[in-house]
Structures are given as C-alpha cells and as structure tokens.
Image: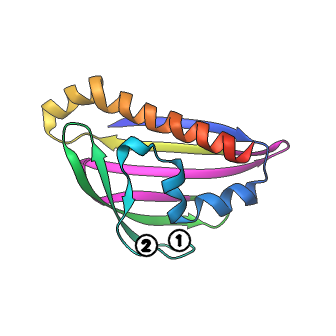
Amino acid sequence: MHILERRQAFTCSAETLWQFISRPENLNAITPPDLDFEIRSNVPERMYDGLLIEYRVRIPVLGKQGWVTEIKHIRDGISFVDEQRFGPYRFWFHYHEVIPTDAGADMIDRVHYVAPFGVLGRMVETFFIRKTLKQIFDFRRERLHEMFN
C-alpha cells in the first residue's frame, strides 16, 4: 500500500474551507483540466454518509475511465473520507481534514492506495502513478491557494 499526504495552510476560516470541500461539485474546480474530469451522477448540495458519486476521468494511456466513490465517516466541519467502490485503483481511501489554526485553517489530504495489475501495477506506481498523483495534488494546492489565501 502507498500513501500520499499533503498539508496546506490557509488564511481563511476552517468553516469557509469546509463549506467548499464539503460540496461535491467543487471537485471540478480543483482538478487539472487535462484529466477531463466529469461528475456523472446527480450530487446534492451537501454530502452525506453513504453518498455514491460517479465520475469519468481521463487516465493517460488508459483513456476515459469510470470511477465511483462513496463518501463516508463525515465529521461535520472536520473531516470525511471518499473511498473508491469502482475505479482505476485496486484500493483507494482518501481522508480529508480541516483543522482550525490561529492563522486560519490547515487542510490535510491523506490517500492510501494500491495500484491495479499486481506486479506490473507496482512497477507503474513507481514510475508513473505516484508522479501523476503528486501533479494532481500540486494543482489542487495552487488552485486552493488562489481561492482561499
């Protein structure tokens, strides 16, 4: 299993940050355009435990792929998890947390994942998947910084 973790500081309040990340449709605003990300299911204004969200995303070499995540373990105003039910990974567990600070808020993203395709997937993870995920989270960091700092 692999882990990618990012922590980012914001000058906005934790409540403001939570209001943004707790709305599923806002994921479009922080996803790199080259992934051609598309939410396929109807999403409510606010997420809830057990919410299933269907996406399509362009994965280099593989093309457009379906992805279904379930929103779980919501602690309102604090944290939630999106867990893959169907998609490109063998396992995907993404924890999001917002922490109030004296300066505003910090956000933690922690993804536990396992690549598909067994041994081949482990080799691809080393040279491609980790690099791609870092680029995605770098893009998110920049977009969120522009929006909230």
Q: Which mark is residue 47?
A: 1
Asked if residue 43 lies left or right of residue 90, the reply is right
* Res. 81 visible in picture: yes
Which kind of residue does numbered mark 2 sit on?
Leu
* Residue 79 placement, left or right of 124: right
- The residue that appears at 48% across and 55% down in the rendered structure is 28
The residue that appears at 45% across and 38% down in the rendered structure is 136
Question: Left or right: 30 with respect to 117?
Answer: right
Q: Is residue 91 one of those drawn in magenta?
A: yes
Residue farthest right in this picture: 102
- Say which quarter of the image contains residue 77: bottom right
Per the rendered image, the range of residues in magenta is 80-106
The residue pinned by badge 2 equals 51
Provide the secondary structure element on which disc 2 rests: loop
Give the residue at x 59% y 44%.
108
Q: Where is residue 48 in the image (x, y as percent from the top left)?
A: 52, 74
User: Please, is residue 136 above or below residue 97 in the view?
Assistant: above
User: Observer-nearest residue: 109 or 141?
Assistant: 141
Which amino acid does the dot numbered 1 rest on?
Met
